[in-house]
């Protein structure tokens, strides 16, 4: 195409594509953020183990999403439940912009949606850290990205899903509105958080985590620096996570700009609140509480990030920060050992996010981000809406809990009964780096311990990593 | 809006918005860079303390800027001194693009300017590290972002500020030109650097930093790796810091492209020079000198990043690298203990940046970035300008020194006399992580020391961070 | 320019510029990735040494590319071999968009191409780590960025290079197609990888790396965490590396979107394969193998990233992952000590990348990314092409081996005979941080060792880094 012949519409399509691609890149960077947060939260003896799970999430997830996930999520709808075309990025005509399935924006959306699927999946690795087998994790990672998550995404975000707000005919919308989950409090975070909860339930707590009298012990955390770095990376990527969800950027740049601002306010308010609550309850300024409060704030405002006023996002974030503290204690009281507090952040934050989008979405913002016609009825009930969005969001919330909960429960139980889900007590106490990954990290800072014989040769590829 | 109806002007506005939003994201990432640089520069015993200050800067700064800062800086002008509208992102009509205060670009600018305010504020935390109280830091952080910094930004960058180069009528411009501070050598860096200098002056040096005979001792630095990572992150974010300041990207893409190139050259020349100067004076290749030289080069070219030729940026950066060495020694000779050399980098680099913009701005570049009409008079005096820019920049420089110096001096003195600005000697020697943040980091690498009793329970939220 | 007068063509040019600038920023971030990967791969005793080499690459490379490199690479062609104008960013008219040499896009391309040159150069530092002198490294770094690399770039990517696919007249194209090296498997990665191989050949292995019976010992690696962080940063930057190479984004957004997708698939498939091969051969799940497999996959698909279908990229990446394992062992068998496996990743991956682009480029994709007219003949032979691309790519591959191999061999031999290329045995065993960089890092984690006297004063600039 000669640039002299280019029309404004051509440029607009290119800009929309660029926006989604850059959003995809920013969300992909969250994989590095999750990896740093998780490795910072585990013991040194499981360093390589958690790193390789994060690397594997990205790598296997990409292949699974390419071959299966994207088709199930965004292929042609079948019965409101699942997509049935577009597997392996194949459509009728890969290059036609008018007739084919995959034009520039479709390719960009494929990539963007992969980064979302990968985010949902990697949430689980941190919760189950320090005692899950590698095989169990690989199996879960592939199935979540390739099958369980795509179905959820189809329900909410495809143009045919039963809960989608993007159906062609308004009359078909769930409660007249469809679900308002702009960037995935439910689709992404509840899915990852619920899978994490089922995982730690089946897996059981780490050795030494809980005492017989019901109290708990804190376990060694490798580095608050890495946890902080990871959280900053996640917050940064979240700007793309939420604002990149504006797929028609040129038509609505104000929505994208406001979404980014709201994302900053939501994270900030969650972090401050959680820091203060911990100070009041436990007496000290806790880095981890501030960091996880930021993340819970971010999860909380994600569903309504397209439809909030700044003050709404502030309130939602503040309550998210409070919620984090109590959800975290709830897990401890039930002896559920979630190494990175993934369920409090992502599952509880995600549920609150879906509910709050039904409460705090303003009419003005709903009109710009979704539909002017139904903004009067579908706004949040605190902004005069009729409750259709709240009802749709609660139904969708329950559907996600049921679908993800049942399937991951089944998956982890079957795994436990077949290939095994948990390493031996001996391996757990020694750490998994020695027995599975060729030796511990930080040989110069730590005395060498070798409590389990390991295979491997001093003459091989990857030597630079094989200490 | 249907994409078929989109005009080139619509697309241009969207692209301008996208450019500012992406710039904002890049500058926000600098918060992670500052955090890594600062934590790498302090002792391990103050790890969580410096991390939580950086997290707090981002979080509280966002709330303060949303509620107060942006209105004071960019609201409707009152007397050339301060803005008085637009608080909490409220205007007459939030959504109208023709009548309201906050259209897409306004939202984007709000976010972009927040990241600048947060950068100015976080500069201070590193300088005052390892002995300032948490309360004093929180108070300073909130007031700098919400009040002190916004006034400076209003003077230079609003369309009504007394020193602004963007006034409607050229006759009102200070010395016929207004201040040339394209991306904030003065507004951002001098503000942060001057507050840092006042802070360390009131706070006094760390225990053991200076000897009675006038010599100084180097204090334990946690990790040159983290300092390097942070500096790379800052350099990267600086591309957005400077080039994102081109708010009409579509009209002047060449300015943005040149700004990015100049930013690379300025950082590179500062780093090389500082490395060489330290080698000549001290006899070894010092990582910290190279890193801080890069930063000083970047600060130095920021004011004129829109108006330099590449060779001008090179000279300015080289001299910035030399300046860093002598400014750093000047502080030491006066027993001012600046943990990360924030004042040499940001205050001295910032002053040199304002002066050099009055010397090295070319006519061609000034015409593109500011105004063709006054490029003959307002160019740098080395490029044939009449000195109006140099005069305006020097007056603005003095005004920033006075305003920020007096207010932060007052703030820190009042803090010292009321809630206290410095931790106890016992806490300082033991490090603040133990007494205030629930225990030291790196429990597996360090023997546990508990010299101060700490509150806190083994049963609480944030357990993953509470070692 | 008033935005009301803006045409779609103006906006398109601005968007094309923005795309290249953002790509440049993403690739610049790879400098941080290389630094983290390399520092994670060396012993703690050489931490500052490897950091300062990475900092120096960025800084000196910027100056060298500004003054010399860009002109040699992309100035007006002389004889198909070298460019001869545009040094120091000077052209006939720096600001004219119709008559001058440097318009917005030219400035953006200058920056983008600098980041490529810096990538090629920094590949070498990791291979030669832990025993090369600082002077030898500085000399190599400057010459590679300023002279050796630019010539290679000129051959393949300028509009006059003998191997270029962008010549004005199709009849002049090498084998009727010219080289298909979309983002530089050959230009960037083979150049860096071949220089690395020559470097370690002349330098010899680290003390203790190989035993007399032919076996090898693994050397202490500082941190698998930093290696992982660096690899994630590189993968992220690679999205900009490949997709940013689409210089007419608005005309072909689908190419850019597909390039990004292909980049994800290529890295993922390489990482999975390499992880599995190592498990099968060595018996454990090796983090380093997964990480280097990702990188080899990425290098492998870079040449054809504009012309592959996703399934083609998958196959190329899988084979790249296998290749890595055997190339790494080949080096070890020949007692070539490549600290970060730079040659297996970049040289062998790069060669495979050039070959595979001649095999797997599809007609559809070639038509969009290069030329519709010659897509039938220039597609990969597995997609029905006539082999012209394969022939051109193999000739170019041999030319790069010869040019880079001979010049860097000469450079390193001359260096060895004059200023010296290797530190003393005493310095090597003690590590270079003590003797050259003012003392070891991590003073709080490591007992202090001072086996070599060092110069330097306790009173000097850069004190924060001088432990």
Image (cartoon, coloured by chain):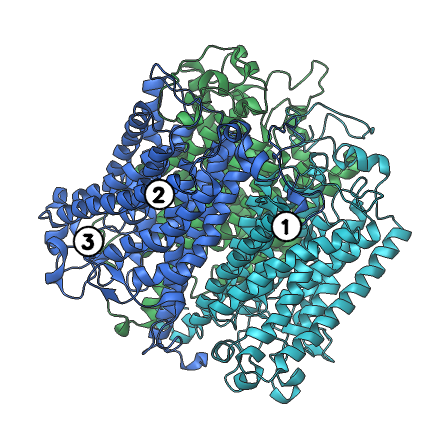
Chain colours: A green, B cyan, C blue
Q: Identify residue for label 3.
A: C366
Q: Nearer the viewer, mark 1 or mark 3?
A: 1
Spatial CA distance of label 2 from label 1 is 30 Å
| Residue B446 to residue A226: above or below | above
Mark 1 surroundings: few (<14), some (14-19) or many (≥20) residues within 10 A? few
Spatial CA distance of label 2 from label 3 is 43 Å
Q: Residue at coordinates 29% horizontally, 46% vertically from top-left?
A: C407
Q: Are marks 2 and 1 in contact (CB under 8 Å)?
A: no
| Residue B256 to residue A230: above or below | below
Co-location on one chain, circles 2 and 3: yes
Q: Can residue C381 be seen by looking at this rendering?
A: yes
Q: Can residue A180 be seen by looking at this rendering?
A: no
Give residue A462's position: percent from left, percent from top: 38, 27
Q: How many marks?
A: 3
Image disc number at residue C414: 2
Mark 2 surroundings: few (<14), some (14-19) or many (≥20) residues within 10 A? some
Give residue B98's position: percent from left, percent from top: 53, 77
Q: Outermost residue toward the right?
A: B417
Q: What chain does mark 3 sit on?
A: C
Co-location on one chain, circles 2 and 1: no
Image disc number at residue B281: 1
Give residue C424's position: percent from left, percent from top: 49, 31
Task: Label 2: state its secondary structure.
Answer: helix
| Residue A204 to residue B44: above or below | above
Give residue A413's position: percent from left, percent from top: 46, 19
Image-based side of C148 in relation to A29, left or right: left
Spatial CA distance of label 1 from label 3 is 57 Å
């Amino acid at each position: 195409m000669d640039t002299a012949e280019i029309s404004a519409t051509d440029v607009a399509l290119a800009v929309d594509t660029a926006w989604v691609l850059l959003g995809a890149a920013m969300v992909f960077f969250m994989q590095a953020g999750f990896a740093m947060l998780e490795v910072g939260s585990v013991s040194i003896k499981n360093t390589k183990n958690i790193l390789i799970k994060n690397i594997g999430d990205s790598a296997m997830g990409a292949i699974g999403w390419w071959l299966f996930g994207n088709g199930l999520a965004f292929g042609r709808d079948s019965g409101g439940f699942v997509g049935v075309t577009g597997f392996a990025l194949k459509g009728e005509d890969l290059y036609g912009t008018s007739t084919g399935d995959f034009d520039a924006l479709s390719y960009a959306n494929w990539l963007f949606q992969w980064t979302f699927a990968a985010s949902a999946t990697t949430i689980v690795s941190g919760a189950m850290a320090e005692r899950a087998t590698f095989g169990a994790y690989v199996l879960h990672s592939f199935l979540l990205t390739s099958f369980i998550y795509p179905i959820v995404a189809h329900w909410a975000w495809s143009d045919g899903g039963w809960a989608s707000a993007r159906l062609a005919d308004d009359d078909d919308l769930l409660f007249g509105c469809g679900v308002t989950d702009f960037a995935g409090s439910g689709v992404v975070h509840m899915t990852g958080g619920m899978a994490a909860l089922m995982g730690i339930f089946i897996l059981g707590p780490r050795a030494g985590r809980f005492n017989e009298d019901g109290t708990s012990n804190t376990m060694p955390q490798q580095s608050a620096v890495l946890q902080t770095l990871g959280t900053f990376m996640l917050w940064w990527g979240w700007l793309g996570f939420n604002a990149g969800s504006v797929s028609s950027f040129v038509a609505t740049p104000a929505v994208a700009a406001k979404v980014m601002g709201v994302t900053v306010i939501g994270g900030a308010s969650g972090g401050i609140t959680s820091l203060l609550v911990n100070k009041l309850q436990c007496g000290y300024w806790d880095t981890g509480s501030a960091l996880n409060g930021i993340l819970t704030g971010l999860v909380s405002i994600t569903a309504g990030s397209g439809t909030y006023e700044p003050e709404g996002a502030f309130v939602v974030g503040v309550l998210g920060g409070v919620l984090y503290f109590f959800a975290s204690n709830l897990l401890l009281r039930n002896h559920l050992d979630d190494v990175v507090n993934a369920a409090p952040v992502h599952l509880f934050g995600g549920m609150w996010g879906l509910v709050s989008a039904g409460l705090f979405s303003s009419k003005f913002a709903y009109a710009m981000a979704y539909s002017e016609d139904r903004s009067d009825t579908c706004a949040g009930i605190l902004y005069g809406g009729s409750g259709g969005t709240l009802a749709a969001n609660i139904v969708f919330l329950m559907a996600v809990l049921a679908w993800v909960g049942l399937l991951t429960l089944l998956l982890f139980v079957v795994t436990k009964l077949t290939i095994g889900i948990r390493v031996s007590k001996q391996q757990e106490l020694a750490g998994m780096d020695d027995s599975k990954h060729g030796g511990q990290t930080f040989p110069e800072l730590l005395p060498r311990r070798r409590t389990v014989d390991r295979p491997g040769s001093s003459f091989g590829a990857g030597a630079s990593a094989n200490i």
